[in-house]
């Protein structure tokens, strides 16, 4: 056997080896994929739970701290906190951080929620601007207000984290919804939740024409019932609010007499 025949045989058997190697490797990958796919389906069937309301109200659901940094937000701060208090969640606390406001933000909070100064011991794990005072309310036990020197939004959030009780926290900007449409003549609010309705009411009070996009003819009808939903909408939005649903266009035109309140356009 010459060198030519040897080289041809070597290349031939090497190609067979490479082919067998890749066939075996891809076969193993395919088997692993099928096994993992089976386990994924089993996991989805085992963990699927559609009643998220029960999950949110469960004692096993982790509590959360909602941090609300506020600077010169006298006009919207009370409406924002009122909306947050209506969140459908098991256990939560609201921490408002008054970041050196020069208007009546703190005064409005104290008057609206009967806040009093409290002596609260906490660990200052993150350095922040000095905290001037901490306020709490006997009536609203899950509400805490921090009054501190101005240091910016990030510094205000750090102060809120220092005083938070729960392992989970999130940030909500007090004027994130209102200020976006503050100078607009028309605004569209998607969703007729408590927060959405409060935002719409605040925008309406500023002379803005508000359109609410919602799946229901009457807001909160499935939760509170039609009559209470109409009453809540009337008290919150007053009148001349246009509401569009996903199935068509409906109007809310509530006169002073609630018995004549019509929620469907003719």
Image (cartoon, rainbow, N blue to C red):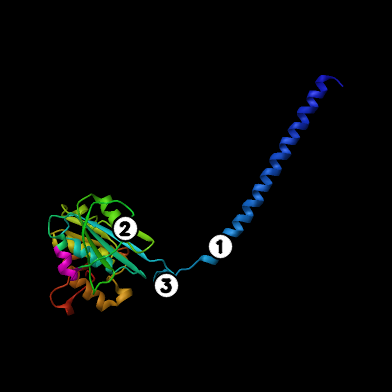
Of the pair 73 and 133, the residue shown nearer to us: 133
Q: Which residues are magenta?
A: 107-116
Residue 230 visible to an observer of this rendering: yes
Which residue carries the number 2 mark?
Answer: 162
For the residue carrying disc 3, how many other residues have a C-alpha within 10 Å: few (<14), some (14-19), or many (20+)? few
Q: In the figure, residue 95 lies in which quadrant?
A: bottom left
Residue 46 in the figure: left or right of residue 255:
right
The C terminus sits in image quarter: bottom left
* Label 1 vs label 3, nearer the camera: 3
Of the pair 111 and 257, the residue shown nearer to us: 111
Q: Position of residue 16 (x, y in %)?
A: 75, 35
Q: Are marks 2 and 1 in contact (CB under 8 Å)?
A: no
Residue 58 in the figure: left or right of residue 81:
right
For the residue carrying disc 1, how many other residues have a C-alpha within 10 Å: few (<14), some (14-19), or many (20+)? few
| Mark positioned earlier in the residue sequence (1 or 3) | 1
| Mark positioned earlier in the residue sequence (2 or 1) | 1
For the residue carrying disc 2, how many other residues have a C-alpha within 10 Å: few (<14), some (14-19), or many (20+)? some
Residue lying at the far right in this picture: please name it: 1
* Label 2 vs label 3, nearer the camera: 2
Of the pair 218 and 61, the residue shown nearer to us: 61
Of the pair 149 and 153, the residue shown nearer to us: 149
Which residue carries the number 1 mark?
Answer: 43
The disc label shown at residue 59, or none: 3
Q: Position of residue 27 (x, y in %)?
A: 68, 47
Q: Secondary structure at mark 1?
A: helix
Q: CA distance from mark 1 to mark 3?
A: 23 Å
- Magenta stretch: helix, strand or loop mostly: helix
Q: CA distance from mark 2 to mark 1?
A: 38 Å
């Amino acid at each position: 056997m010459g060198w030519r025949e040897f080289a041809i045989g070597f290349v031939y058997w090497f190609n067979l080896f490479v082919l067998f190697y890749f066939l075996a490797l891809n076969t193993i990958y395919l088997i692993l994929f099928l096994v993992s796919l089976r386990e994924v389906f089993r996991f989805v069937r085992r963990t699927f739970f559609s009643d998220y309301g029960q999950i949110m109200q469960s004692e096993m659901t982790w509590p959360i701290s909602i941090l609300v940094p506020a600077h010169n937000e006298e006009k919207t701060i009370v409406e924002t906190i009122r909306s947050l208090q209506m969140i459908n969640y098991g256990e939560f606390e609201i921490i408002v951080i008054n970041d050196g406001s020069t208007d009546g933000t703190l005064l409005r909070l104290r008057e609206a929620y009967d806040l009093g100064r409290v002596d609260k011991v906490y660990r200052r794990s993150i350095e922040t601007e000095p905290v001037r005072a901490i306020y709490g309310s006997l009536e609203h036990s899950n509400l805490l207000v921090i009054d501190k020197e101005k240091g910016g939004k990030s510094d205000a959030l750090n102060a809120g984290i220092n005083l938070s009780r729960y392992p989970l926290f999130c940030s909500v900007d007090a004027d994130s919804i209102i200020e976006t449409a503050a100078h607009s003549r028309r605004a569209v609010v998607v969703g007729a939740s408590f927060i959405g309705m409060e935002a719409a009411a605040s925008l309406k009070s500023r002379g803005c024409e508000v359109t609410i996009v919602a799946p229901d003819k009457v807001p909160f009808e499935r939760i509170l019932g039609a009559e209470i939903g109409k009453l809540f909408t009337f008290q919150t939005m007053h009148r001349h609010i246009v509401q569009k649903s996903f199935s068509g266009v409906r109007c809310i035109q509530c006169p002073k007499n609630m018995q004549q309140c019509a929620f469907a356009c003719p």
